[in-house]
Amino acid sequence: MKTTIVTTTIFVPEPLVRYAENARQYGHRDVSFIVVGDRKTPAAAADLCARISRDFYPCEYMDLESQKRYLSAFPRLWEFIPFDSIQRRNVGLLKAWQEGASLVIT
């Protein structure tokens, strides 16, 4: 069963490191993370995802450009997901579902 943890943030999502440590400690294998950035998200959030990918599980950071590219398959959807809002997380939820996640944690 594939599990994907999805979040949006305007901070560096440091708690994800603990989630990754916990998942590994309890033997979870098919785990991934998607972090959906927003206008205020610091660049260091991408660095954190790279660190999680290196040390634990795949972690994808989606900046605004990568979100727009991803949503090009759904052109009208981009218009309905506001900036500076928790709804930005919906981009990650859609991506997790398309990538076959059986369980999505937000």
Image: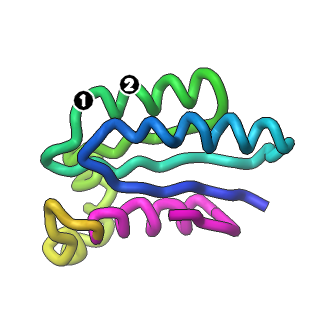
| Vertical placement of residue 87 versus 71, above or below | below
Main SS of the magenta part reads helix
Q: Say the numbered circle drawn on residue 47.
A: 2
- Asked if residue 48 lies left or right of residue 2, the reply is left
Dot 2: within a 10 Å radius of its alpha carbon, few (fewer than 14), some, or many (20 or more) residues? Answer: few
Residue 56 coordinates in the image, percent (x, y): 66, 30
State yes or no: discs 2 and 1 in contact (Cβ < 8 Å).
Answer: yes
Q: Say the numbered circle drawn on residue 100.
A: none
Dot 1: within a 10 Å radius of its alpha carbon, few (fewer than 14), some, or many (20 or more) residues? Answer: few
The residue identified by callout 1 is: 43
| Vertical placement of residue 24 versus 75, above or below | above
Report the front residue among 58 and 9: 9
Residue 17 coordinates in the image, percent (x, y): 56, 34
Report the front residue among 51 and 62: 51
| Vertical placement of residue 59 versus 89, above or below | above
Alpha carbons under labels 2 and 1: distance apart: 7 Å
Quarter in which the N terminus is drawn: bottom right
- Asked if residue 1 lies left or right of residue 5, the reply is right
Q: Is residue 10 magenta?
A: no
Please, what secondary structure does the residue beneath circle 1 have?
loop
Q: Which residues are magenta?
A: 87-106
Residue 99 coordinates in the image, percent (x, y): 58, 59
